[in-house]
Image (tube, helix red, strand yellow):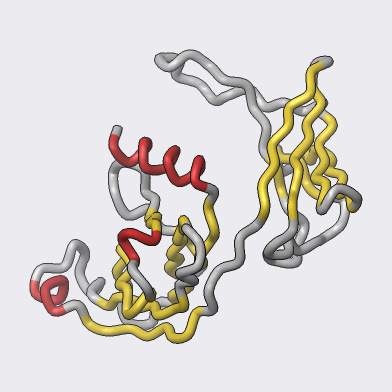
Amino acid sequence: NQHKQHIVKLSKTIGYYENRENPLITNAIVRIIENGNLAYEFTFSENEGVYISSIPFAAVPGHFYELIIEYDGKHFYGSDTLQPIGEVEDMKWRINERQQRRPWKEGYYYEVLISAEEPQYRKDFYLFHFYRNDSLQRYDDKSGLFFSDDNAIGERIENMAGPVFYREGDHARFEIMSLTASAFRYYNHLARL
């Protein structure tokens, strides 16, 4: 839901044991359709290695979006409705005393706490991104993802500690994103590998 030029990255699959980068697809037609009528075209950027929307736009909660890709004579299609996310009410920090006694890295024992609404009238799935000094943090050796559903969160997100530690002077930032049920199952599967 950020007003910006959005990106789509397309690549071909490779064998599981192949030790090389997935080859990029550079000659596809990529577009996103909003509510069946407003189209956003994407063009491939050689410098970035991704498709970039021709104009900035912000996705709107409750609107229906279709991703349409034409490549090699075939059409690929995905669609979903962007679910609203509860308002973040509070973000604060505290010293994690256990981490302070035995830090994973010297000085890194501050944690960010988040409080937010969690709409109870529907089933929701979330992906959280935590940044340290504007760098996205991967916090484990598996997926590096921090995600949840209503069952784990409960009625409210109340002083939820992120999985990333900070040191004094660091800039902390986080994002909460809505996931589809299938994306949640996918991330859940990745975390169990």
Across and down, in percent, residue 38 comes to: 89, 53
Q: Residue at 33%, 59% (x, y): give it.
A: 151
> As displayed, is residue 140 above or below residue 123?
above
Residue 28 is drawn in which quadrant? top right
Q: Residue at 10%, 68% (x, y): give it.
A: 102
> As displayed, is residue 6 above or below residue 72?
below
Across and down, in percent, residue 52 comes to: 78, 47
Q: Residue at 29%, 69% (x, y): give it.
A: 165
Across and down, in percent, residue 183 comes to: 50, 43
> Which of 58 and 139 lies nearest the eye of the viewer?
58
Q: Residue at 48%, 62% (x, y): give it.
A: 135
Number of marks present in the image shown = 0
Location of the N terminus by quadrant is: bottom right
Residue 78 is drawn in which quadrant? top right
Kindly give the residue lying farthest to the front in the view shown.
Answer: 121
36 relative position to 146: left or right: right
Across and down, in percent, residue 5 comes to: 77, 57
22 relative position to 111: left or right: right
Location of the C terminus by quadrant is: top left
